[in-house]
Image (cartoon, rainbow, N blue to C red):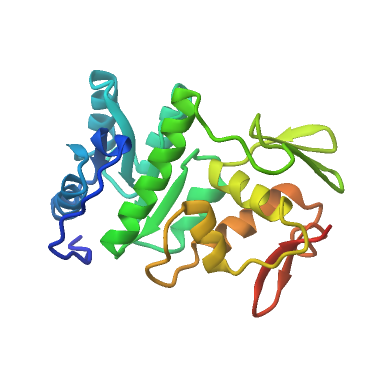
């Protein structure tokens, strides 16, 4: 335990409608949970805490005001991945998973947990807040029916893919494929800007709607998993191309 989280004493202004929401923080490490709570409260969020998976599931049923979940992956009893799968059977509430091990990220993104995003400990508090704000904006827009219409063509065809922005649906050879919200947004960003190369930092800033605070492999992990879903051969991609030393693009 005793995982280090960077923290600074800073109060953020500019509260938005998402900031008044309640967020459930689930971590058996009290120090981590308390530090996450401090930053969320300073940014205007209401925070509830649970120490394990069972308590998390119980609190979700008792507190309908909870609008987002920050969930540690390694906990006694029901672990974070199983909690995430259980919640996804009945709810599309945003779930941000925390892990102390970078190698857990492939499990989180790739094995159908339903997590919307993840962070590896130790993380910068500003990056945590950026991820929270991004997910809350997306969730609030969907819940209120005010998700902004795209400024590009709503349905895009690329080889054997059809991407429908309005419905948030992607079909490959006529069959719908399951993408996470982040995967969909990355794909739509690149597909609606064919032949333009985006760096990993640009993709992060456009999809997460926040500045990059530190170097991480978040975008690369999502790109890899996205390729495994949309490409016939992810090791030899024909749709989502790498431009070495620069970034990624989808060819028109």
Task: Report whether 187 appears left or right of 75.
Answer: right
Q: Nearer the viewer, residue 1 or 77?
A: 1
Which residue appears at 30% of the width and 40% of the height?
16
Note whether 86 is above or below 212 in the view shown. Answer: above
Task: Report whether 69 appears left or right of 168.
Answer: left
Q: Position of residue 191 (x, y in %)?
A: 73, 51
Q: Do we see residue 97 in this rendering?
A: no
Which residue appears at 72% of the width and 73% of the height?
243
Task: Report whether 109 appears left or right of 68.
Answer: right
Which residue appears at 86% of the width and 44% of the height?
160
Q: Quadrant of the N terminus?
A: bottom left
Q: Nearer the viewer, residue 43 or 118?
A: 43
Q: Nearer the viewer, residue 125 or 16?
A: 16
Q: Nearer the viewer, residue 206 or 237?
A: 206
Which residue appears at 24% of the width and 41% of the height?
25
Q: Position of residue 42 (x, y in %)?
A: 16, 49
Q: Position of residue 67 (x, y in %)?
A: 33, 31
Q: Quadrant of the C terminus?
A: bottom right
Task: Report whether 33 appears left or right of 132.
Answer: left
């Amino acid at each position: 335990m005793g995982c280090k989280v960077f923290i600074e004493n800073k109060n953020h202004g500019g509260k938005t409608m998402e900031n008044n929401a309640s967020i459930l923080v689930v971590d058996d490490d009290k120090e981590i949970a308390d530090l996450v709570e401090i930053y969320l409260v300073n940014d205007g969020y209401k925070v509830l805490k649970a120490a394990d998976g069972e308590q998390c599931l119980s609190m979700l049923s008792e507190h309908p005001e909870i609008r987002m979940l920050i969930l540690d992956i390694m906990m006694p009893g029901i672990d974070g991945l199983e909690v995430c799968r259980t919640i996804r059977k009945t709810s599309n509430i945003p779930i941000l998973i925390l892990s102390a091990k970078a190698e857990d990220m492939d499990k989180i993104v790739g094995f159908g947990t339903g997590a919307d995003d993840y962070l590896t400990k130790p993380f910068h508090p500003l990056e945590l807040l950026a991820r929270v704000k991004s997910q809350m904006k997306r969730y609030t827009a969907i819940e209120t029916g005010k998700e902004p219409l795209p400024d590009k063509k709503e349905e895009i065809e690329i080889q054997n893919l059809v991407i429908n922005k309005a419905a948030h649906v992607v079909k490959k050879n006529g069959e719908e494929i399951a993408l996470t919200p982040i995967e969909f947004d990355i794909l739509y960003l690149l597909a609606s800007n064919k032949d333009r190369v985006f760096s990993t930092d640009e993709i992060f800033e456009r999809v997460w709607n926040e500045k990059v605070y530190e170097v991480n492999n978040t975008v690369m992990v999502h790109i890899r998993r996205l390729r495994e879903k949309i490409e016939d051969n992810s090791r030899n991609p024909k749709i989502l191309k790498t431009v070495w030393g620069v970034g990624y693009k989808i060819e028109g």
